[in-house]
Amino acid sequence: MTVDTVEKLLVEELKDLYSAEKQITKALPKMAKNATNNDLKTAFETHLKQTEGHIERLDRVFETLGKSSSGKTCKAMQGLIEEGSEQMQELEGEILDAAMICAAQKVEHYEMAGYGSVRTWAQLLGQKEVADLLQQTLDEEGETDHKLTQLAGKINKQAQRHAA
């Protein structure tokens, strides 16, 4: 399909985000399992529940638009998850926790960029319900990023002490 309108661009980017969210639901349980810090483990478990809600919200968006969610694989998310998987094999303890926070924030920033764009395009196209649903997810992604930043303050110090 040729992407030559904002509506087509919106749908293509929504498919990319849908694929990304599906991939994240497979990665988060592994991250939670490998986290040594209990707060970080809880954050990953909480975000898994949120991510499942993001998928449900995207299903509603596709239904509202009368479009299918299938047909695209988010290669960027594949790469981000692959990097994180390599770290889980190579690192351990507090250093791994610090690395997983970094990996998770890369994912959050990718999602925030995507959700911000599709929300704006939905607004431009007069799709208020779609834009509102996407804004809800964007807000949750921002909250998760903020929580990870707070956890990083403590965990990075623990990782530094462990290395010294």
Image: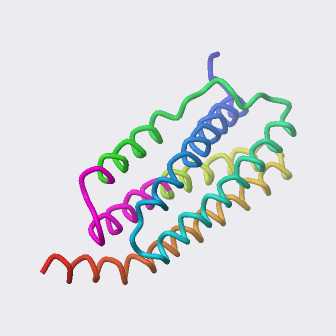
Viewer-closest of 19 and 32: 32
73 lies above or below 50: above
Q: Quadrant of the C terminus?
A: bottom left
Q: Is residue 5 found left or right of 62 in the rendered image? A: left
Q: Is residue 15 found left or right of 164 in the rendered image? A: right
On the image, the x and y values in percent for residue 127 come to 83, 46
| Residue 98 falls inside the magenta stretch | yes
Q: Is residue 139 found left or right of 81 in the rendered image? A: right
Q: Which residues are magenta?
A: 88-107
Viewer-closest of 95 and 55: 95
Viewer-closest of 12 and 152: 152
On the image, the x and y values in percent for residue 147 come to 52, 75
On the image, the x and y values in percent for residue 138 come to 65, 60
From the image, give the main secondary structure of the stretch colored magenta.
helix
- Quadrant housing residue 98: bottom left
Viewer-closest of 74 and 2: 74
- Quadrant housing residue 67: top right
Please count the marks in the image. Answer: 0
Q: Is residue 136 found left or right of 162 in the rendered image? A: right
Q: Residue sitting at 69 percent across and 58 percent down?
A: 137
Q: How is the image coloured?
A: rainbow
35 lies above or below 8: below
Q: Residue sitting at 65 percent across and 55 percent down?
A: 51
59 lies above or below 149: above
On the image, the x and y values in percent for residue 141 come to 60, 62
